[in-house]
Amino acid sequence: MPPKQRKIAIMGFRSVGKSSLSIQFVEGQFVDSYDPTIENTFTKSTRVNSQDYELKLVDTAGQDEYSIFPAQYLMDIHGYVLVYSITSSKSFEVVQIIYEKLLDMTGKVHVPIVLVGNKTDLHMERMISSEEGKRLADSWKAAFLEASAKQNESVADIFHTALLEIEKANGNVQEKSNCIIS
């Protein structure tokens, strides 16, 4: 079976670790300082539920509450990873604004989304509880994960979960069984 092409946009306030998550997933290394003003696309092949994917990650330049939502973040994007930092209430607010804009722009009721609370390694500075993150994701019917790009915790899970959310939205839900219907 040929790999499915999937494109995921990673969005969030500046400095929440969007690039760090992308680079950790694609290259397996933690990059702390990264030019935040550029948009970058990373490509990685990955496999979920015995399906191969050719994954393109659009690592967007950070958004804030005033950002105009560029149309290219809607074109042939299959799913979204919305990232906030658990140490920043501001980034948590901004991620909600991005979500609202996303729904406005796509005109859809449901978009495949994974909400990610990044920087769990900074637990001493935590301002957003896991419960708050989970509540928000539930209200969006989105998947929720907390991660640390630095410690490579749950990083691959984010993108695998995003692929599963995309499949679900496409109506290709495979509940965790291996039975093949031919």
Image (cartoon, helix red, strand yellow):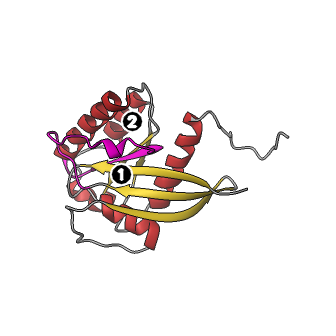
* Residue 176: x %, y % from top left: 69, 43
* Residue 157: x %, y % from top left: 50, 55
- Does the CB distance between marks 1 and 2 fall below 8 Å? no
Task: Give me the residue at 35% from left, 38% from top.
Answer: 131
Which secondary structure dominates the residues rendered in magenta?
loop
Q: Is residue 42 left or right of residue 64?
A: right
Relative to 108, say whether 159 is above or below: below
The residue pinned by badge 1 equals: 10
Task: Give me the residue at 68% from left, 39% from top.
Answer: 175
Mark 2 Cα shell of 10 Å, populated few (<14), some (14-19), many (≥20):
some
Residue range corresponding to the magenta coloring? 61-88
Query: Which residue is at the front of the view, 121 or 79?
Result: 79
Residue 34 sits in quarter: bottom left
The residue pinned by badge 2 equals: 137
Query: Which residue is at the front of the view, 64 or 91?
Result: 64
Q: Check the picture and name the quadrant holding the C terminus.
A: top right
Question: Which residue type does callout 2 highlight?
Answer: Ala
Relative to 100, say whether 63 is above or below: below
Disc 2 element: helix
Task: Give me the residue at 34% from left, 68% from top.
Answer: 150
Disc 1 element: strand
